[in-house]
Image (spheres, helix red, strand yellow):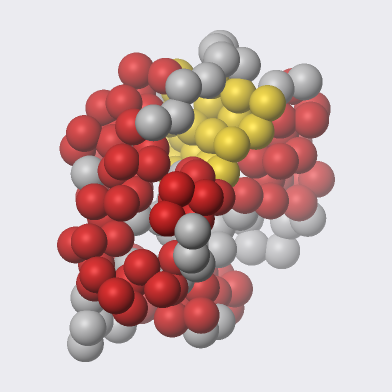
Amino acid sequence: MDNIILIGMPSCGKSTLGRILAKELNYGYVDTDDVIIRQNGCPLRDILDREGVDGFVRREEEAICSVQAQRTVIATGGSAIYSEKAMAHLKALGRVVYLCLTFDEVERRLGDLHARGVAIAPGSTLQDLFNERVPLYEKYADLTVHIRDGNSVRQSVAVLLQQL
């Protein structure tokens, strides 16, 4: 196990679980959203407002493809799966783990999509986004870990470690 790449819907725990998982494994940690922010000098929502979803996905692809790592947990943005090039790069870096949540749990956790900088087409609902993305997460995943509603962060990390 070299790198572990976490994919999934916004709010599924990629960043939170990723940081703890990295500590448990004595790995480094990279959040590709942070790479996008650093490379562009602005929040994700500013890129979305200025360039739309397509422009954001291009910026995300550039950021992801710039990541080089060893023994690192890499937490991606929820829209990473829209770029075949980015996902091929991530799969070459390590094992891709889909953190799967139910729609109801995603809806409960997520809150304001715009404030979170979620790449969603104008007029689309969260249900539309969920239905569009889940098959892509499943396509790219080497492993799917079901994050149970009501589990603590520690319990979710324990499940993740067990399945790795």
**Of all residues shown, which one is farthest toward the front?**
41
In the image shown, does 78 or 107 lie closer to the viewer?
78
Which quadrant of the structure image shows residue 56?
A: bottom left
Instruction: State the residue in front, 133 or 100.
Output: 133
84 left or right of 44 in image: left
* Residue at horizontal 65 percent and vertical 40 percent from the top: 18
Residue 132 seen by the camera:
no
Residue at horizontal 79 percent and vertical 27 percent from the top? 24
> Can the viewer see residue 148 in this picture?
yes
Vertical comparison of 109 with 161: above or below: below
Rendering quarter of residue 88: top left
> In the displayed structure, does residue 149 sit left or right of residue 158?
left
Task: Name the residue rendered at 33%, 78% in the picture.
Answer: 49
Tally of numbered tags: 0
Quarter the C terminus occupies: top right
**Residue 68: x and y, percent?**
46, 22
Residue 123 in percent (x, y) is at: 21, 87
Q: Quadrant of residue 110?
A: bottom right
On screen, residue 9 versus residue 1, left or right, reads left
Q: Position of residue 106 (x, y in %)?
A: 51, 69
Residue at 48%, 65% in the rendered image: 42
Question: In screen coordinates, is 90 left or right of 102?
Answer: left
Task: Decide: is 151 above or below 17.
Answer: below
Q: Residue 50 in the image: state x and y as whole percent.
A: 29, 75
Question: Above or below — where is 11 with respect to 156?
Answer: below
Name the quarter where the N terminus is drawn: top right
Q: Would you place residue 26 above or below residue 135 in this image? A: above
